[in-house]
Each structure stands twice: as C-alpha cells, then as structure tokens.
Image (cartoon, helix red, strand yellow):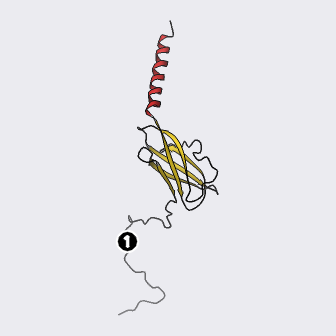
Amino acid sequence: MKNKPALFIFILAAFFAGSSLLSQSSKTFKVTNNAGFPVKSVQVALAGTFEWGFQVNAIDRINNNTSFEFARKIDPAMCSYDIRYTDETGTEYIMEKVDLCKTATILLVLPEVKTEAPKDDTQPKDETKPKDESKPEEKK
C-alpha cells in the first residue's frame, strides 16, 4: 500500500482534532445589557483575533436592563475573549479580554468616554511669565 503514511497522518490529525474538541466544554452564559441603551447585536471572538462570527443573541433588540442566554464551547486553554456589541445606530463597543472560563455572567456596560487628551509630561515646563509688550520697560 502506497498510501499507508498518508492514512497514518490523516488518522493522527483526526485524533488530535478530536481530543481538542473533547477538551472544550459547553457553557451557558447570561448577558445583561446595562449600557443604558438598546443593543442590536452581541458577538464573541477569541481575544485579539477580531473573528466575530455570528451573533449570540437570538432576539433583534436587547433593551436596557434585560438579559438573554447563549451556550458556547470554551477551550480551557483559551479563556480570554473579546465581546463586541452594537447599538441601533451601528456604533460598535468592544469589551476586551473577558475571561469566559471564570465567569458565566457578562454585563454590557458603556465604556468610559475620555474627554481630554492625556497631558504630555515629557516637555519641560516654562515657568517664566510672558512679557507685556504693550508697555515699554522702565529704565532706572
């Protein structure tokens, strides 16, 4: 048989793929919208991948202070997930690095809004007062 090595590699690959799937356990998560506005969609991706896939919410609109549940297989070796939710205007919000191995409750909250730019403390401060050039200097 010429294809014996290929068959062995196929069986070995199937074994490892199957063992990876067996290590994943299905878990039910409760998502509560505490963002202060209705949410249209919620999606989950492995942290940093931005591979969102399908919506986990089965309803088209999650009103504020309401919840829904979804089930997902979680690999205990990869617990960190990003959660993206979208409001009715299409604005997207991302909650980064949520540990889905440790929690079964996800609260959608409005992220902090930064209103001013961070201060640049690397530049030396000029403590001198500007001269008032509208008046001539007095000579003594």
Residue at the (45%, 49%) spot, across then down: 98
Point out the residue furthest to the bottom here. Answer: 140
Q: Circle 1 sits in a helix, a strand or a loop, which is it?
A: loop
Q: Nearer the viewer, residue 4 or 109?
A: 109
Relative image position of residue 134 (x, y in whole percent): 49, 88
Mark 1 is on which residue type? Lys
| Total tally of numbered discs in the picture | 1
Residue at the (52%, 54%) spot, across then down: 32
What crowding class fits label 1: few (fewer than 14 Cα within 10 Å), some (14-19), or many (20 or more)?
Answer: few
User: Does residue 125 appear left or right of residue 111 in this picture?
Assistant: left
Task: Please identify the quarter of the rendering in which residue 39 is found.
Answer: bottom right
Figure quadrant of the C terminus: bottom left
Task: Please identify the quarter of the rendering in which residue 38 is found.
Answer: bottom right
Residue at the (43%, 48%) spot, across then down: 103
Residue at the (59%, 47%) spot, across then down: 57
Task: Please identify the quarter of the rendering in which residue 89 is found.
Answer: bottom right
Task: List the residue tagged with mark 1.
Answer: 125
Relative image position of residue 125 (x, y in whole percent): 37, 71
Point out the residue furthest to the top here. Answer: 1
Q: Nearer the viewer, residue 114 or 32?
A: 32
Relative image position of residue 11 (x, y in whole percent): 47, 18
Q: Nearer the viewer, residue 72 or 90?
A: 72
**Is 78 situated above or below 140?**
above
User: Does residue 115 appear left or right of residue 127 in this picture?
Assistant: right
Point out the residue furthest to the left here. Answer: 140
Relative image position of residue 104 (x, y in whole percent): 46, 47
